[in-house]
Amino acid sequence: MRFSRLGISAVFAAFIMVLPGAQAQSIADQADEAEITAMDLEKAGNLDGAVAKHREAIKLLEPIAKYAKKTATFKENFEITLLNAANAKFNAKDQAGAVALLEEAVALDPAGKYAVTKKVKESLSAVKGASLNQEGVNLLKAGNAAGAVEKFKQVLDLDPTNKAARINCDVAEAQVALTAGDPATAVAKMQDAVSLDPSRQFLQDELTKVKAAADAKAAEDAKKAEEEAKKKK
């Protein structure tokens, strides 16, 4: 989903002013041209090119204090382009690239003055969460349940309402508990996971497995207790 941007008239309205000389005029014209090119490139679907041109426009104009208002407008437009480019990278499975662009966008407006910044921060949190969640899934599949738990907890720190990460964390913690010889905790964790998504067969199967492990341990503990009791007689 693409975020709408400011119109051309809004971008260049600040040009109605007295320029400080031929050199400033030339620099402002170059920045002006780069900004227009950036917008044209984005409309044509060339987001990488648009990002590069926005950077060029801001680099040219930012040192001129008189154009602080115009520079701010350029930055807001650039932030919108970065958000759109990040969404495209995320959809292309380039999560690292998406995070880098979104972090650059946030840096353009550290005070949160622009309307788009809230959306950028939300997107950054979501993309980071998705990336961390996938890292956790990969660790879990590789047999590193403890490492997976840490990744899923990082996702939940970003977004405590992330259902997928909560379920994955429960599954990973169940695996950690089983490895530690604590099937009762594993059962409790899997029950939590199932309660979040009762229709998911994988979770039901995992719950069955840990219940079987818990029953086996209970039987083993009972047998040991019986043997110890016999020794005492």
Image: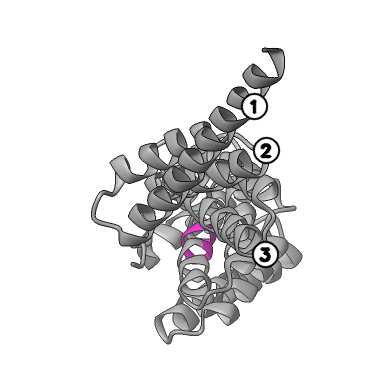
Circles 1, 3 touching at the beta carbon (< 8 Å): no
- Residue kind at label 2, given as amino acid type: Ala
Q: Label 1, label 3: how many angstroms apart (C-alpha)?
A: 39 Å
Tag 1: Cα neighbours inside 10 Å, few (<14), some, or many (≥20)? Answer: few
Q: Up-down: is 158 above or below 202?
A: above
Instruction: Return the residue at label 1.
Output: 227
Give the labeled residue for mark 2. Answer: 180
The x and y percentages for residue 208 are 38, 51
Tell me the tag on residue 143: none
**Residue in view at x 37 percent, y 60 percent:** 202
Q: Is residue 206 above or below residue 146?
A: below
Q: Which mark is residue 142?
A: 3
**Residue 210 or 25: which is nearer the viewer?**
210
Give the structural element (helix, strand or loop) at label 2.
loop
Q: Is residue 40 magenta?
A: no
Please tell me which residue lies in front, 133 or 50: 133
The amino acid sitting under disc 3 is Ala
Name the N-terminal-most of marks 2 and 1: 2
Q: Nearer the viewer, mark 2 or mark 3?
A: 2
- What SS does tag 3 mark? loop
Q: Choose the circle earlier in sequence order: 2 or 3.
A: 3
The quadrant where residue 132 appears: bottom right
Q: Amino acid at mark 1?
A: Glu
**Callout 3 environment at 10 Å: few (<14), some (14 to 19), or many (20+)?**
few
